[in-house]
Image (tube, grey):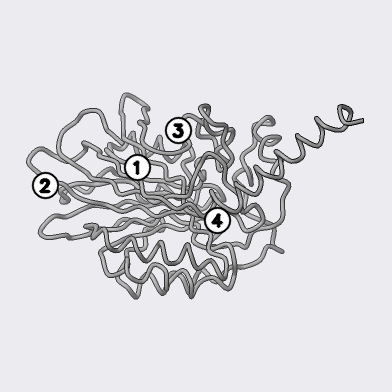
Amino acid sequence: MRARYGVPLGITAAGVAGLAYAAGFEARSFRLRRVTVPVLPAGMRPLRMLQVSDIHMVGGQRKKQRWLRSLAGLRPDFVINTGDNLSDPEGVPEVLDALGPLMEFPGAYVFGSNDYYGPKLRNPARYLLEKAAGKHGLNGNPPAVAAVHNPWEDLRDGFDGAGWLNLTNTRGTLKIEGVEIGLTGLDDPHIKRDRYERVTGGPDSGADFSMGVVHAPYLRSLDAFTEDGYPLILAGHTHGGQLCIPFRGALVTNCDLDTDRAKGLSTHTTAGHTAHLHVSAGCGTNRYTPVRFACPPEATLLTLVAGAGTATE
């Protein structure tokens, strides 16, 4: 009898323990990654840029809010928010409060699908099934009309009121101690809100340095930025895979980006051009799947330096 039930009970116990770790510990184990990227023109001073992404704020997430506020102590030159701030229609005040100290610094943002629409309960296994079928999450289509509307307008007004640049299918410039940084942004390709034709033309010729910013790193957006000559592209959306296999990595990216580039620094090449790509694993989860495994929540401090060489983490 003991042999008959011992193995399945052991498997069940291991599964329960793994779920408890993924939900109770790792999903709240916030950390900062530091990356050096050699993309600036020769002679330009280094720039320290903080990227925050995929906060997916739900009411009552006090530890996440305290951690986000603490990032202001890094004193970055500027902040880039790559979207999906919400996972709760009531979460706007808590997002703005948590990011309040960071909004004292120059910054810019794009939105993701979860800023516009509330999440729905889904079977997590569907992501694997959709990948096998060649689909990607919403498969590039907006949610149904019945989808919950998130108050993204209030979030936008809060960011704009703090002086952050809204990069929704548009361009902008940050001026930091005499340095001009050109920013070109897209709305979320995951729900077909990207309009690259509105921003085409390449980096701002009057800026000292330019980069592309987008929430979901769909290949069409990465190709467009890279072919236009942007040396750096920032994105989020993937959660780094969220549930990963140790020593192997992500199983899915929830878009058409390959899993080898689900998070961190890499490159993207198309039409003879190559750009650095940084994909943040983000610091939150969908409210209905509040777990992470082998992929802790994060923000990234990127130090941009002069020269063209191998980037380091």
For label 2, the crowd category at 10 Å Cα-Cα, with few meaning under 14, some 14 to 19 and many 20 or more, is few
Could you give the CA–CA distance between mark 3 and mark 1, rounded to whole angstroms? 13 Å
Number of numbered labels in the structure image: 4
Who comes first in sequence, dot 3 or dot 4? 4
- State if disc 1 and disc 4 touch (CB < 8 Å): no
Judging by the rendered image, the residue that carries numbered circle 4 is: 113
Who comes first in sequence, dot 2 or dot 3? 2
Judging by the rendered image, the residue that carries numbered circle 3 is: 261
The residue under the point 43% across, 41% down is: 221
Q: Position of residue 65 (x, y in %)?
A: 45, 66
- Look at the picture and state if 158 lies above or below 45: below
285 vs 126, nearest the viewer: 285
Q: Amino acid at mark 3?
A: Arg
Q: Amino acid at mark 2?
A: Arg
Who comes first in sequence, dot 1 or dot 2? 2
- State if disc 4 and disc 2 touch (CB < 8 Å): no
